[in-house]
Image: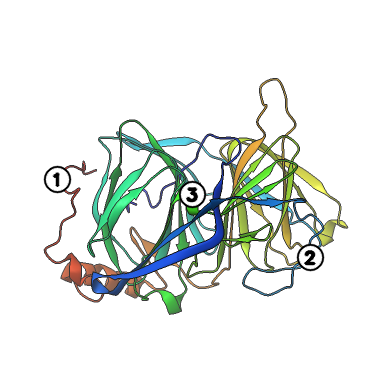
Amino acid sequence: MSAATACMPLVPPSPLHGSSAAMAAAVERRQQPGAMETTKTAGSEGTVVVKSHGNDQDCAGDDDGDVTMSRPRAVVQTLTCERKPFSEGFALWRSIGRPELPELDPILSFDEFEFSAPAGFPDHPHRGFENVTYMLEGGISYHDFSGHKGTINTGDVQWLTAGRGVVHAEMPAGEGVQRGINIWINLSAADKMVEPRYQDLASHDIPTAVTADGVSVKVIAGECLGTRSLLRPRTPALCLDVALRPRARLRQPIPRGWSACAYVIHGEAAFFGGSASDGGATTVTTAAARTLVVFGNEGDGDCVEVRGADASAGQQDGARVMLVAARPHNEAVVRDGPFVMNTREEVEQAREDYRRRRNGFEMADGWTSDHASTVATH
């Protein structure tokens, strides 16, 4: 998305997800001009049904995603997000990337957004991070300098590893308001200059796990309830769209050392947690829609536990929560608009490379997107 807004978000209205693709899927990989890799996934329609939601499940431990669950992580911060208009047709609810929470290593920003004409993001560059766009309502059309183009529709996800450089444009794909979630995830110093890569998953190809007691999880990245996504983020990450009926509960493993947060898209959710420092006592934090919950990372909690709020006269459909976790880099971060690097010199080099159309930006020379003449510049 635009450097001016730093990133975008998105959210859908349904209380529980419909059917999704099973893990038996064919993956087609092809090279775009300039060695940019794209991955599109196609699979047979299906849903994984789980008898229990894994509250007593044990998993073998490693630092890339599997853990043995013993204690839910404590909630250490909650942030209520307010709608902030940025231009005519574009507004967002920012949770990460604001003064109270500048970043949650390696998550640089987390936004829910509204996008409609005449707003748009004309041709602009990126370097040094991964850009995740998950559409909840409507769609976004995009076109980049390698020729990669298309539309991210309702329920689809695009996981873009910008690496050494991407130039693209984005605009609303239809009439009315388009809504989504946009997340920026930092790349390590070793991966800042990798070749760009697109991983696109249509909504029906994102695997879904459903439990008998009212939990439905779209596994965008990582694994949940024995169901694994085909997406392979460069920075190890977990990304789940969780729908819970009233009182339905999910206990999700989170690798020790990873940063973790949850954003309530719809309804109201209760988060259970405790820490060794308080004797293991369980505390309950209730969060309403458009609230970000940040979990502690002290090494004494290895899962997140969330439950849909009790049904009431005005709340009958539980909650919808986006759960995101990722392995931190513990490195210096220097960011300037669309460039995220480790030093000020590297950021200046990125700007110079883009200006001179070199070192990853060669294809930008003389290129304009299909949207260049129709997108309003802000």
Q: Amino acid at mark 1?
A: Ser
Q: Is residue 238 visible?
A: yes
- Nearer the observer, disc 3 or disc 2? 3
Type of the residue with mark 3: His
Instruction: Give residue 373's mark.
Output: 1
Disc sitting over residue 135 in the figure: none
In the rendered view, tell whether residue 189 sits above or below residue 320: below
Between discs 3 and 2, the one toward the N terminus? 2
Image disc number at residue 58: 2
Where does the image place residue 69, in percent across and percent down from the top left? 78, 63
For the C terminus, the quadrant is top left
Residue 97 in view, yes or no: no
Left or right of 31: which side holds 304?
Answer: right
- Amino acid tagged 2: Asp
The answer to which quarter of the image holds residue 297 is: bottom right
Q: Earlier in the sequence, mark 2 or mark 1?
A: 2
Q: Quadrant of residue 364?
A: bottom left
Instruction: Check disc 1: other Cα within 10 Å, few if <14, some if 14-19, many if 20+.
Output: few
Q: Position of residue 116 (x, y in %)?
A: 32, 35
Residue identified by numbered label 3: 204
| Residue 20 position within the rendered picture, expressed as x and y whole percent measured from the top left | 54, 49
Residue that sits furthest to the left in the current view: 366
| 65 to the left or right of 70 | left
What is the distance, in whole Å, between disc 3 and disc 1 at their CAs? 33 Å
